[in-house]
Image (cartoon, rainbow, N blue to C red):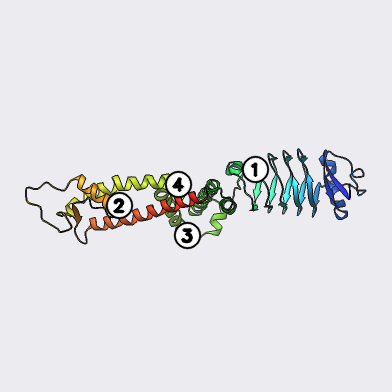
Amino acid sequence: MAGSEYVFGRKHLQLNAHEKKKASAVIEKSGGKDAKEAGTDDSKSASGDLNDAVFGAQLLDNLELSDVRFKHCTFVNISFKDANVLRCTFLNCVFVACYFHRASVENCIFTACRFIDSDLHKIKFFACTLNYIQFRGCYLRFKEIATQLPKEQNNVMLMCRNLAAEAAAAGDNYEASQYRKQEIAAHELDLWRTVIGYDQHYKDHHDSFERIAALWQVAISKLNGILFGYAESVSILVRNFLIASLALFPVWYYALREQFTPIASGSSPSTLPPTSAPIGFWDCFTYSLDRVVPGGSLSTIKPTTASMAAIVAATESIFAVVLAGLIVTYTFRWSSRK
């Protein structure tokens, strides 16, 4: 085998001459051959670090790797299929076109690392720390990383925004939606912690005006979720559309029925005779349907000019247009990914 080799148990990573000194630091920990057998005569280091190394084009299926610290290392076109990585640290490392199918990663720390065009399908993380990780041309399924997200909410937002974009680019709209929802939840939690001064960090970095602004932002965000489902759930959009059109606004109109005027067939206002029946709930219900159905003509009442009923009617029309637009957008986005 050309060049030197870095031994991980029964598996090997080739090194060039410049990397020989870097390899000896971890050979003893990996349970493989000693430094001389691995192709290097350099003395071992007790630190267990491997810095500035480049590994490429290796099949390391079923690799057993533990208690190694990698710093500023690059892994290119390496298969880690069914590998078990335990208690390792990766600082500022890059993984390019690597294969992690069914790999198990436990009690490891990844800081400022990048995964580029790698296969991360069915990789499993257990009790890991992931800080400032970036993905390009690949993504993790949400369920595989949900319990491993960073503690800092701004870090969660950055990671989820990145993964949502990569999942969407890959056509996986469901996973992209999961990450967008998590990003929103992290943003709201970060805002709320700002409002209450969650810890000394929030107290030191946000004054009273910023806390008031954060309270307003979190209120608007929560309202967006209640009314529009953050435009991520078509079921919430349809539900709210039906509740508003069939129940909420008809009841509101009925409460303001004194501000409505009956109209005859066509659109000409008329005056009810003294013996005529008063405006009932059905009249209000049909009027609400006319506000949300284009060209609707079921109603036989109309609000008086410049009344509260007229303002409510305009509000319903705007609300219906916004909800219908979101439903159409969501449906188009969903169908375009199929």
Q: Which residue is mark 4?
A: 233
Say which label, 4 or 1, has the lower sequence index. 1
**Which numbered disc, 1 or 2, marks the residue closer to the eye?**
2
Q: CA distance from mark 1 to mark 2?
A: 46 Å
Name the residue rendered at 70%, 43% in the picture. 100
Q: CA distance from mark 4 to mark 1?
A: 26 Å
Say which label, 3 or 1, has the lower sequence index. 1
Say which label, 3 or 4, has the lower sequence index. 3
Q: CA distance from mark 2 to mark 4?
A: 22 Å
Disc 4 residue crowd, few under 14, some 14–19, many 20+, Cα 10 Å: some
**Which numbered disc, 2 or 4, marks the residue closer to the eye?**
2
Q: Are marks 2 and 3 in contact (CB under 8 Å)?
A: no
Q: Amino acid under label 2?
A: Val
**Which numbered disc, 2 or 3, marks the residue closer to the eye?**
2
Disc 3 residue crowd, few under 14, some 14–19, many 20+, Cα 10 Å: few
Q: Amino acid under label 3?
A: Ser
Q: Which residue is mark 2?
A: 293
- What label sits on residue 121 in the rendered view? 1
Q: CA distance from mark 3 to mark 1?
A: 46 Å
